[in-house]
Image (cartoon, rainbow, N blue to C red):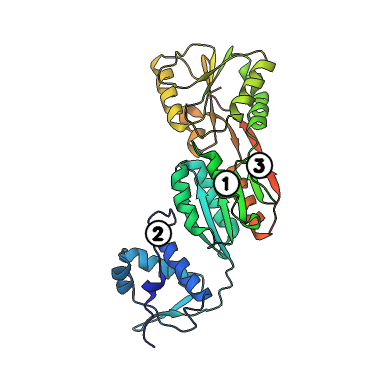
Amino acid sequence: MKPIRLYELIHIDEYSATPKYLQLTNSILTAIENGKLGQDDMLPSINELSFELEISRDTAEKGYKHLKKIGIIGSVPGKGYYIANASPGRKLRICLFFNKLSAHKKIIYDSFVAALGENAVIDFYIYNNDFSLFKKLLLPKLDQYSHYVIIPHFIEGVESAREIINTIPKEKLVLLDKQLTGITGAYAAVYENFEKDIYHALEQANEHLSKYHTLKLIFPEKSYFPTEIIAGFERFAQEYAFTYKLVYDIGHEPIQEGEVYINLMEDDMVTLIERIVSQKLEVGKKVGVISYNETPLKKIILDGITTISTDFHAMGTLTAEMILNSRRDHLEVPFYFTHRPSL
């Protein structure tokens, strides 16, 4: 049989954060599901695929190897690759939107993909907290997927984002990490309760906070972080009689003995620690540091940075389980205080 001109069935999306080899494999699986590729159909050579799609030979080879590993294609020496299984039974096609890339977002992604297993196609997009980019990426895809999983953190355009998200059929919608007010209907959500979480985490830290007199929350202006974090921080400080302050620019904030700094962004943590060290203030004794969101590096920096953090692995796993079991619950993810020498 003449090889199928497979490259005519494949769309490589340069905006997608999904690796190109997975876009290749997902396109082949979709072509099988749509009846455009059948049992024993021959596939183009790796060299032809690389040339026609303008992708590296390594990418084409990796895509074929992945399909061979999951039993979709086979190969015959001297003849090439062919469809070995035209009934892969894949029903889930998931469009995944993250607001940004970070160490903790990778934990969510990895646990989500692992829990879904091989029976799902995932197209992954990063919109950088930008509503315009989110809209550009989402609107052309509104009828193409079985599920839309969205982390809805926007710096601007929240009202418009809400309107677009409300057009997604609710049986297909999963909101991840953050609840978004005004989303109607019975949809799924796996989220943090930001005000409650920081309040209770600081309550757990209270014994260690008692040697300090002032709490400072570094909350950058024009931030995508929910303002509920501020509400929980201020409520704790008022109820437990701490002096407190919101800091918008840690690069210019005076740092003094007896203060505890809570940072949300990784860049701010680096700036903060550099300034504390330059002033020869001992971290964990003269000045305290608490960092939002657990990452592996925080276990090591300065012998350990104290963190307050949701369980990102659980977040990804619970989201996958919600999809696999066709559930539309709203689940709060556990939130933890982890004490280390920085406090």
On the rendered structure, is 76 left or right of 285?
left
On the rendered structure, is 236 left or right of 261?
right
Circle 3 crowding by C-alpha within 10 Å: few under 14, some 14–19, many from 20: many
Query: 209 or 146, which is in the foreground?
Result: 146
Amino acid type of the residue tagged 2 in the rendering: Asp
Query: 65 or 264, which is in the foreground?
Result: 264
Q: Residue at x 48, y 70 (%)?
A: 69
Q: Is residue 100 visible?
A: no
Q: Is residue 288 visible?
A: yes
In front: label 3 or label 1: 1
SS under mark 3: loop
Amino acid type of the residue tagged 1 in the rendering: Glu
> Which percent across, then down, holds residue 207?
66, 19
What's the CA distance linking mark 3 and mark 1?
26 Å
SS under mark 2: loop
As displayed, is residue 289 above or below residue 186? above
> Which percent across, then down, holds residue 8?
38, 73
Amino acid type of the residue tagged 3 in the rendering: Val
**Residue on which the image places disc 3:** 333
Query: 228 or 47, which is in the foreground?
Result: 228
**Residue on which the image places disc 1:** 163
Circle 2 crowding by C-alpha within 10 Å: few under 14, some 14–19, many from 20: few
SS under mark 1: helix
Q: Which labelled disc corresponds to residue 13?
A: 2
Query: Residue 182's quadrant in the figure?
Result: top right
Q: In the rendered structure, are the residues bearing label 2 and label 3 in contact, judged by CB atoms less than 8 Å apart? A: no
As displayed, is residue 111 above or below residue 102? below
What's the CA distance linking mark 1 and mark 2?
25 Å
On the rendered structure, is 126 left or right of 89?
left
